[in-house]
Image (cartoon, rainbow, N blue to C red):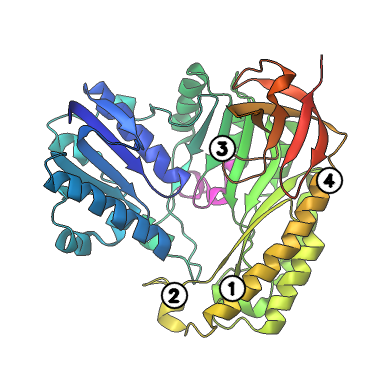
Amino acid sequence: MRSNTVDIVTLGCSKNLVDSERLMSQLESNGYKVTHDSENPMGEIAVVNTCGFIADAQEESINTILELAQRKSEGKLKKLYVMGCLSQRFLHDLEKEIPEVDKYYGKFNWNELLQDLGKAYDVNKRNERHITTPSHYAYLKISEGCDRHCSYCAIPIMTGRHVSRPIEDILDEVRKLVGQGVKEFQVIAQELTYYGVDLYHRRAIAELIEQIAEVPGVEWIRLHYAYPSDFPKDLYRVMREHENVCKYLDVALQHVSDSVLEAMRRHITKEETYRFVEELRREVPGIHLRTTLMVGHPGETEEGFQELLEFVKWARFERMGAFAYSEEMGTYSANNFKDDIPEEVKQARLSKLMRVQQRISAEIQEAKVGREMKVIIDRREGDYFICRTEYDSPEVDPEVLIPASEGDLTIGEFYTCRITSADDFDLYAKVVNE
C-alpha cells in the first residue's frame, strides 16, 4: 500500500471521465500522487466514479465497489470513497448495502471529498484537469443535466436540469488544454444543442463552437449528443465555414415511427425526422452522422420496427449504434407503460437492424478507397499505427490502420494518407509523401 497515493476508477461515459480528471488535478495540487484506472491499485485511498445509466453499468459499478471493499477488509486499502451517477441515484440504498465505503458522494458534490481528506478545493483551478486520454485529445464538457424528459431515460433523474458553463470558463479550459498539447476536442453534454438557454436565454452552441474554433492550436472540434427537435440551424454555418470544426455530428434519433416517437416523448415526428436528416446533409456537405436507435420500446409494433428499418436504409448513417429497451426505475415509461415486448423479440430486431447497418457501413467505407484523407495518429498496436479521420471519434468509431513499415510516425501528429482498402468498419492506408 503506497502512502499518499489515490487510485481513481472511472466507469461509464466521457462526462464522468472529465469529473475524474478535475478531481485528479485538485488532489495533485494538494500533494497526492494519483493514478487512474490502475489494473493493480496500490494506493491507500480509492475513489470509484460510478455509472448509473442502465442495469449493466450499475452492476459493473457495484461489482467494482465490492472488489475494493474486499481489499479494504483485507487491510490493503485505508479509505474507499464513491462518487458519480449511481451514487447520486441510489445514495441511501448504497449506504445501507455497502457500509464498508467511507463516504458516498453524488454527481455534483465530489469536491467535498477534498474537505473530508483535510484538504481544500481550489476554485481558481476549477478549469484544470489531469488528462487521462492520449495527450493530443480531450473531452470538453460544456454543460450538465438535461431538460428533456424522454420516456426511457434516467439521466434527468440523476443530473437534474440543464446547467450551461459560461463561455469564458470553457474558453479558459480550452486554452489551458492547448497549452498542455491538446489539439482535438470532443465537445460533450447530455444535450449540447440546448447549450446557453439557461445562461443567455438563447441557444448559444454555434457562438460557443465558433469561439473555440478561433483559439490558436485547436485543430479539430467534434460535436456529441445533439437533439433533433428545435436544432439550432446557425450551427450549420459554423460547421461549413470553420475547417477545424469536423463535419461530424452525434445526434441520437432513437426511432422514426410516429407512435413510438410519441410514446418516447421525443417531440418530433417521422416527417420532421426525415426532413432534419435531409437538411443536415444539404447544409453541411460531406457530414458524417452518428446516431443511436432503440428497438423494443413499449408499444413498438412489427410495423413500427419495419419503419425504422426502412429509415436506416434511406438515411445511410455513417455511424450507428443501437440497443434494446431496458426498463429503468423511475422513468416515465417504467411508471406508465408495460414492458410488453419479449426479450427474444427485442434481440431479434436489434440483430436485424445491425445487420442492415453493417452492410451500409461496409459500402460507405469501401467508397473511401483511393481517397486521400487527413488522419491523426492515436497509438501503435503491433504492426500498425492506429489513426482516425475527422469522421471518427475516439473509442466509438472506426479507425484507420497504417502499416508500421510506413516509417516512424509520431503519435499525436497529423498526416495525409491514401486509403488502400476497407473492411466492414475500419480502413487501411498508406502515408502520402508530401
Q: Quadrant of the N terminus?
A: top left
Spatial CA distance of label 4 from label 1 is 28 Å
Residue drawn at x 47%, y 18% as measured from the top left: 180
Three-letter residue code for mark 4: Glu
Q: Quadrant of the C terminus?
A: top right
Spatial CA distance of label 4 from label 3 is 26 Å
Instruction: Name which of mark 4 and mark 1 comes first in the sequence.
Output: 1
Q: From this viewpoint, is residue 130 visible?
A: yes
Left or right of 120: which side holds 262? Answer: right
Q: Which residue is mark 4?
A: 366
Q: Which residue is mark 1?
A: 347
Q: Which residue is mark 3?
A: 186
Residue drawn at x 52%, y 21% as measured from the top left: 178
Instruction: Name which of mark 3 and mark 2 comes first in the sequence.
Output: 3
Closest to the observer, 310 or 360: 360
Spatial CA distance of label 4 from label 2 is 42 Å
User: Which one is in front in this view, the residue at disc 1 or the one at disc 3?
Assistant: 1
Q: Are marks 4 and 3 in contact (CB under 8 Å)?
A: no
Three-letter residue code for mark 1: Gln
Closest to the observer, 424 or 397: 424
Q: Which residue is mark 2?
A: 332
Three-letter residue code for mark 2: Tyr
Q: Are marks 2 and 1 in contact (CB under 8 Å)?
A: no
Which element carries disc 3, helix, strand or loop?
strand
User: Which one is in front in this view, the residue at disc 4 or the one at disc 2?
Assistant: 4
Instruction: Name which of mark 4 and mark 3 comes first in the sequence.
Output: 3
Spatial CA distance of label 1 from label 3 is 31 Å
Instruction: Name which of mark 4 and mark 2 comes first in the sequence.
Output: 2
Which element carries disc 2, helix, strand or loop?
helix
Give the residues drawn in magenta, as a range: 189-205
Which element carries disc 4, helix, strand or loop?
helix
Which element carries disc 1, helix, strand or loop?
helix
